[in-house]
Structures are given as structure tokens and as C-alpha cells.
Image: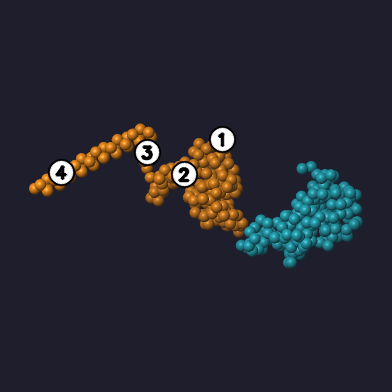
Amino acid sequence: MDVIEKSADDKMSEMSRSIILEDQAKEEMETLLKHNVIITSVNRVLNWARGHSLWPVTFGIACCAIEMMATASARYDISRFGYEVFRPSPRQADLMIVAGPVSKKLKPLVERIYHQMAEPKYVMAMGGCAISGGPFRDSYAVVPGADSFIPVDVYVPGCPPRPEALIYALLQLKKKVIEPESIKQG
Amino acid sequence: MGSKRLADETVNKLLKEFDSLRHLPDDHITKFQVDVGDLFFLLESLKFDTSCRFDLLMDLTAVDYTTHFTMVYVLYSLPLGHRVMVKCDIPRINANILSISRLYAAADVMEREAYDLMGIDFVGHPNLKRILLADDFVGHPLRKDYTP
């Protein structure tokens, strides 16, 4: 009997100890929250940061690039979203906007720029030519779509797409970067 | 762009100098037709003759007439402000012509373009390789009989 009573006592003390520890943890949490500390997974934070500051590489092929420049300029101003930092080096960029028809002569250069970009990297096919070759699809000199040699994340239809369309596409890409699961279901 | 025609006495002087030279009537520009053999010497005179002084090669291109190619040279004189067009027929098979890149430096890239798209061999060109199409491209797409 003595032995059993002793072990029951121990159990009680263990339980009370765990309750005390839990209370302490709650208190600590509350003090942390008071100091604006939020606990989450590292990936979520990184994706959130990536999604809000996509840096495109300075790379334009044809008239779509004019619209891309207009999107970066004061009237449309993609810096509102954090995307205006067009990098002159692919090493510093994580987004390539393929803005125009890729000719067979240009294809190895586009490929090279893509491979020079650091992971994670995203590609946007802007306009009919980059999506499928557009009016030049049957040409002997033009590649029928950028996705025939590099993976494309977002397609922006138009000839050329208006700046609003490009902004919408950037926001879609942001969604894809922040919540990759939502796209997989799509 | 305002440009004068070549003066009549200069045209007559050139017609006397080159046997194969013919003056083609045109409302806008002084136009010549010349044989392949005389072409280089004609352009040389047009560049260095004091009454011509054509120092600017505005255009160099080729036309495929299916029976033959026609080379077209458009020259302009900055000091005298006149313009001339020189045409020269060459056979379609084994199409070749003397390069004028020694005469006009601008001809270098223009001849490369004509070689690239028309397949005309410019004899004496320092660097005759494709300029617009990829290096491994087969054929010359601006020829009328080209099929991809």
C-alpha cells in the first residue's frame, strides 16, 4: 500500500509541475507577443519576403519590353508592390520577364541568362510571342514559345499586354510564391 | 530628305567612261545599270571623282527576280547633296560579286546581310559569315525558292 500511495503522489506532483510549466510558457508567449514577436516556419517567412520583392532582370526583346518599361515608370509604378528593382545582372535577379519573340539565334542567350540567375527563380512569358511565338509561330527564325526551352510560371496574354495586365501577372506570381499549394490545386 | 539628281554633264561623262553603263529613266533618282565587270570601277569613280564625291553608302541590297539577282547600291554625297542608284545583274547560279567593303566600310555588314538572306558570295569580303540568322542555319530565306 505504501508503495502505491507513493507513486500516486509522484504522479500528482508531475501533473502539477507540467501545468506550472504550461502556464509559464503561456506567460512567456504573451510577453513575446507584447514585443511583436510572431512564431512561424522559416519557409513561410522567406516566401512572404520573396513574394513581396521580386527583382526582375533588365531584359527586353521587343515591343512588350516597352510596356514593361511603362509598367516600371511613374504612371503605373510597380515599385508600389516592390518589383521595380530591375537588376542589370542576372545574379541579382529572381524574375525573368520574357518580353517578346525569342529568335533561334537569341535562344541560347536567353537560356544562359536563365541559368545565371540564382535559385529560386521565376519566369514570366509576356505577350503572344513569348507564350506561343504569336504571329511569328511558323517562322523559320523564331522559337514557338519560351516554354519550349525554359519553365514558365505565369503567362501574360496580349499583343502587347497593357501595364495593368503585367501588374496583375506580377500579383498572381506573388500569390504563387507565397502559397505554392494554392497553385498546385488550381 | 532633299537630295539632288546627278548633274547631266557628270552623267554623260560617266556614260562615256564606262561602255556597259546605261542610264535608266526615273522621276526621283539618277539610276544606272551596269555590268558586273565595271561595277567596282564605276563605284570607285563615283566615290573619288570631284564632280561626284559619293562618300556615303546608304544602302546595299539584292533582289531575287527568279531568273537572276539584281544588286542595288544607293550612294549619297554629303558635300554635294546628290544621290545615285546603281543596279547590277548577276546570275542566280553561283551568285558572286566583288566585295566593295574596301571602298565603303559600311558595306561590310550590308554585304553580310545580303549573304545571310540571299546567299550571294562577296569575293574579297574580310568576314563573310551570317549576321542575322543563327550560325548553324541552313539555306538563305529571302530567296524566292526557299522552303524551310
Q: Distance between the residues labelled 1 and 2?
A: 23 Å
Disc 2, SS? helix
Q: Where is residue A128 in the image (x, y as percent from the top left)?
A: 54, 50
Who comes first in sequence, dot 4 or dot 3?
Answer: 4
Q: Distance between the residues labelled 4 and 3?
A: 39 Å
From the viewer's perspective, tell me whether residue A113 is left or right of residue A19.
Answer: right
Q: Where is residue A26 in the image (x, y as percent from the top left)?
A: 29, 37
Instruction: Mark 4 and mark 2 in contact? Answer it, CB < 8 Å.
Output: no
The cyan-tinted chain is B
The residue wearing badge 3 is A38
Who comes first in sequence, dot 1 or dot 2?
Answer: 2
Q: Distance between the residues labelled 1 and 3?
A: 35 Å
Q: Which residue lies furthest to the bottom in this view?
A: B93
- Which kind of residue does numbered mark 4 sit on? Asp
The total of numbered circles placed on residues is 4
- Which kind of residue does numbered mark 3 sit on? Ile
Asked which quadrant contains residue A58, the reply is top right
Who comes first in sequence, dot 1 or dot 4?
Answer: 4
Q: Which residue lies furthest to the front in this view?
A: A2
Q: Do labels 2 and 3 share a chain?
A: yes
The residue under the point 52% across, 57% down is A148
Asked which quadrant contains residue B148, the reply is bottom right
Observer-side mark, 4 or 3, equals 4
Observer-side mark, 1 or 2, equals 2
Who comes first in sequence, dot 1 or dot 3?
Answer: 3
Q: How far apart are marks 4 and 2 (CA)?
A: 54 Å
Q: Residue A9 carries which label?
A: 4
Observer-side mark, 2 or 3, equals 3
Q: Are marks 4 and 2 on the same chain?
A: yes
Disc 4, SS? helix
The orange-tinted chain is A
Instruction: Mark 1 and mark 4 in contact? Answer it, CB < 8 Å.
Output: no
